[in-house]
Image (cartoon, helix red, strand yellow):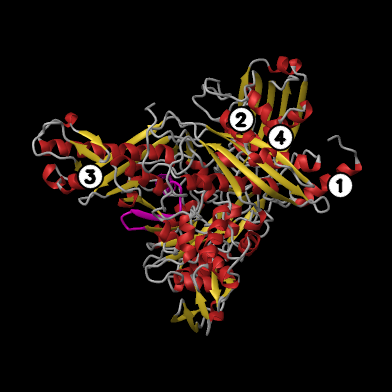
Amino acid sequence: MSAPRDFTYVGTRPIRHDGVDKVTGRASYGADVTWPGMLHGFVLRSPHAHARIVSIDTSAAEAMPGVQAVITGKDLPETTATIALGEAAIDLRDIGDNVIARTKVLYDGHAVAAVAATTLDIARRAAETIAVVYDVLEPVMSVDRAIAADAPILHPAMRTKGAPAASAAEATNVASRLELKRGDVEAGFADADVVVEREFRTPMVHQGYIEPHACIARCGEDGRAVVWCTTQGPFVVRDACAAIAGLDPAHVKVIPSEIGGGFGGKIVVYLEPLAVALSRKAQRPVKMVMGRDEVFRATGPTSGSKVRVKFGAKRDGTLVAASASLWYEAGAYSGSPAGAGAMCALAAYKVPNFFIEAYDVVVNKPKVAAYRAPGSPIAAFAVESVVDEIARELRIDPIELRLKNANAEGDRAPYGPKYGPIGLTQVLEAARSHPHWRAPLGANQGRGVAVGFWFNAGMNSSATVTVNADGSAAVVTGNPDIGGTRAAQAMMVAEELGIPIERVRSSVGDTDSSGYTDVTGGSRVCYATGMAVIRAAEDAREQLRARAATIWNVSRDAVVWNGGRAIPPEGTENAKPLTVAELAAKMTHTGGPVVGRASLYAPMAGPAFGAHICDLEVDPDTGCSRVVRYTVFQDVGRAVHPSYVEGQMQGGAAQGIGWALNEGYVYSADGVLQNAGFLDYRMPVASDLPMIETVIVEVANPLHPYGVRGVGEVPIVPPLAAVANAMRGATGIRFTELPLSPPRVLEGIEAAAAVPVQV
Amino acid sequence: MTKLHIETTINGEPVEFLCDAHETLLSALRNGLGLTGTKEGCATGDCGACSVLLDNRLVPACLVLAPEAHGRAVTTIEGLSRGDALHPLQRKFLEHAALQCGVCTPGFIVAAKALLDANPNPSEEETRYWLAGNLCRCTGYDKIIRAVLDTAAEMKGTPA
């Protein structure tokens, strides 16, 4: 790692480059464009959670004036292709089947047909005339039902990957099983002075981005398509649309719009292949925008879960054994983050003996998508609740207990590798010394603490930095800017070239104009794409240094770059230091344009930890609770733009608080989603929350030239348990099922009043 | 279907448009008039992304029928800045980094303007309850509330 360096721009708080467009309403999001000759698309969705499609009759819709195209699953070929997504591969057969059902519908809201018409009203009315005959099957609505011996099977060909040989041949709803172990877990528990075991449940929750999915596609007679859409991954959309709609990826261009939130939910495709297929049939552009009910019913929430956790500790607080079973709902197709949950579950702690198993279970609910640190919050809810109980049993301060067992540099992570420099101890120490931890509590208030972990991602990134003749610069990457990354990238270019931030134009390219770049996700943009930006700026700077050498007729190695200027070697005649602007002005005569470029694959990122303290006040008469104080501590490696780092920490905490207190999918017994709207799916509003204090801890990440770690995902991990632990403090009750909504809490309080509880 | 002819005022300018009787004001603004700064997040009045002022009253444009704008004055996010001068709320949202994805931002700024018009000196609690009809999923509201309170403090110093 390079020596600590003095930064000029990194760590400052400039106005973001895309800011004015966003506060004036000029920024163009997915649904904000209109193309000439455009049609409107509408999707017909299944009212059943589980049914065989017997027949679909679209003749009445096709005959309706204004209708230009109707498609069903038959119009999109089955594909066996997979496309890369970081460490994982996306199976496009499932994605294609999820985009439009072929033989079976697997959840309420599953698309079965789509219509393009001259107006949205006509498209909607036409869709209503499509006659679908269903053979309705029993829906599988929970993990417990899915794994029962007599459960209906969603996918007849499914066999459990990773299953013991005895059961590997049977049709099942368990897509996979993963196991992690170390030491002798039975001996560990036998050696423990105290053992606590609990079972936890959480419902499916949605990312809740405010902008619904939206796209517009234009497919020409030559089979070439252009897609404008709101997405975290334009290259994923390009490759998925090509495979699902049967086009050559070389003939598909994807232009990412401004994106109105994603949190992992805008990585895969839903509408885009349908819009391409409709446009191909109609030979006109087709715009498709989801309603909020469609977003809830038919995009990708994260898993509901059942998690059993057991910890054993010595009297002095040393954790000696742990076991965990994680059952995550994948929704209609395999792919829950159960494995990630298993790997994150014990990431914070030195536990010499453990056994973890994780099951990926299909149910008749929408196919889950990534949601901010996928898998980790669910595991942390269970683990951090049990660790809290251990601290209570042993009468040890919960921060001290965590510090005593905290993993540090050189310790082996439960998922395999040895940790490099990590900041868990530092965030816990920051929490312990913060006034919040010692502040007095009022009546009916409780305080909870919890920690959280996320790997963070690296993956593929590209960047180009163009030096303009006036000495300004432009940086282009392929990562949609979901929370201020353009500003951070401009700061990096300014830092490397030594020019003012305001003189750097920072843009998001489309799939034709930017080098291949993986998704905006995994907390990877400021880290990995940032690294590409820094290298591209270095490349441009080296070219400028070479131009100075040409001007002075000396070797490049003799030219020193310092303070944004090329410095001539001593004794060079008629030579004075040249700024970027002076060198840029001479570009044409010294070799032509200066364009720096870099592309990289970052196999690793820098894992990160956070600790949250939550104060909760509970009304014992109603069960209604309110967060009265909340502080977030997080190791961010190096904060490039501290305001947006704080914003990630605050926003992640708020989402986690919502998950803890009020959010959750509610299904009827027959599998129909009952709360597909913001009125009944209750996300936190401004009056629900206090100010969220942030404490940035910086333990430099040696993998990044500035020490940056991913920031965005960690902060959603601790809140579920921090809130539940605060609820335990306020009520004396250990709640093990989310959300901690007023009816559930009141029920708990009333049940506890009937039976004396030991506090 | 016969279209209705609507005469209204939008951001201070006279505007005429044709619409169906059941078309929402939100649709007329976005699809008919190209004023896409007003966003649709839910179409059920729950998210506030489509907040506009109708005769200076804060309304979700998704729950107002376009014909209701006839003879009245509509203010949208596009009407807040004057020339190259941002409204103080717009400036403070930028200074406080009170936006991440930005899709809720126009609605918040319009709703906050209505707050400051009605109450130039709101408390934090009053601000939080006034803005409870606007959903933001990125920021946790902290920086939004600070931006609005800071705007109020600054505007108090200058005559309206």
Q: Residue at x 55, y 65 (%)?
A: B152
Gap between marks 3 and 4 measured at Cα: 56 Å
Give the residue at mark 3. A580
| Mark 3: secondary structure | helix
Give the residue at mark 4. A385
Sort mark 2 into few (<14), some (14-19) or many (20+) by Cα contacts within 10 Å: many
Say whether residue A590 is left or right of residue B136. Answer: left
Depicted B26 relative to depicted A141: above or below = below
Q: Residue at x 73, y 42 (%)?
A: A440
Which chain is disc 4 placed on? A
Mark 1 and mark 2 lie on one chain; the one further toward the N terminus is 2
Amino acid type, residue under disc 2 in the picture: Ala
Gap between marks 3 and 2 measured at Cα: 51 Å
Gap between marks 3 and 1 measured at Cα: 72 Å
Write the start and end of the magenta stretch as one range. Answer: A219-245
Depicted A716 relative to depicted A298: above or below = above
Gap between marks 1 and 2 measured at Cα: 34 Å
Which chain is disc 3 placed on? A
Residue A442 position in % (x across, y down): 76, 46
Residue A567 position in % (x across, y down): 19, 36
- Are discs 3 and 4 less than 8 Å apart at CB? no
Gap between marks 4 and 1 measured at Cα: 22 Å
Amino acid type, residue under disc 3 in the picture: Val
Amino acid type, residue under disc 1 in the picture: Glu
Residue A733 position in % (x across, y down): 80, 40
Q: Residue at x 13, y 47 (%)?
A: A588
| Mark 2: secondary structure | helix
- Are discs 3 and 2 less than 8 Å apart at CB? no
